[in-house]
């Protein structure tokens, strides 16, 4: 299984996941330590998320979905599950039973 260093979320994915977690734009921007205007540009696809911001976003996702407690699978598989699709180029093992 390969380790994913970061995941390049599309603007649509960022918006979808923010809404799925019930976070406001202000709250997510605060987590990512960026201005709300930058988050709006990310969600609209006018800018790309940086690797550092992607890592922080993944941490927020893990915390929200209790990744370390309930989900026993690779990060790549986890993201496919929460996004209901997968566009990561990294292949990894499927989820294992707890």
Image (cartoon, rainbow, N blue to C red):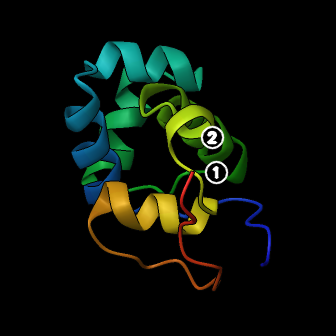
Q: Dot 2, how many residues are within 10 Å of its Cα: few (below 14), some (14-19), or many (20+)?
A: some
Of all residues shown, which one is farthest toward the front?
A: 98
In the rendered view, tell whether residue 5 sits above or below residue 31: below
Mark 2: secondary structure: helix
Tell me what residue is drawn at x 50 percent, y 38 percent: 70
Q: Is residue 45 visible?
A: no
Instruction: Name the residue nearer the viewer: 95 or 10.
Output: 95
| Label 1 crowd bin: few (<14), some (14–19), many (20+), radius 10 Å | some
For disc 1, the marked residue is 50
Q: Is residue 84 in sight in this rendering?
A: yes
The x, y position of residue 23, in whole percent, is 28, 21
Q: Residue at x 58, y 32 (%)?
A: 69
- The one nearer the camera, 24 or 38, is 24
**Residue 7 or residue 69, whichever sits in front:** 69
Q: Which residue is pictured at 40% across the width and 76% down the height? A: 86
Q: Is residue 94 above or below residue 3?
A: below
> Where residue 92 appears, x then y in whole percent?
65, 80
Q: Is residue 19 left or right of residue 63?
A: left
Q: Secondary structure at mark 1?
A: loop
Total count of labels = 2
Asked if labels 1 and 2 touch by Cβ distance under 8 angstroms, the answer is yes
Q: Which residue is mark 2?
A: 53
State the image coordinates of residue 96 (x, y, percent, origin top left). Answer: 57, 65
Q: Which mark is residue 32?
A: none
Which corner quadrant of the image does residue 21 belong to? top left
Classify residue 57 as left or right of residue 52: left
């Amino acid at each position: 299984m390969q380790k994913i260093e970061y995941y390049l979320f599309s603007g649509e994915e960022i918006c979808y996941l923010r809404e799925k977690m019930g976070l406001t734009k202000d709250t997510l921007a605060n987590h990512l330590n960026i201005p709300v205007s930058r988050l709006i540009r990310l969600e609209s696809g006018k800018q790309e998320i940086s690797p550092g911001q992607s890592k922080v976003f993944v941490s927020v996702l893990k915390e929200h979905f209790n990744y370390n407690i309930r989900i026993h699978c690779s990060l790549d598989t986890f993201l496919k599950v929460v996004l209901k699709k997968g566009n990561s180029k990294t292949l990894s093992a499927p989820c294992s039973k707890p």
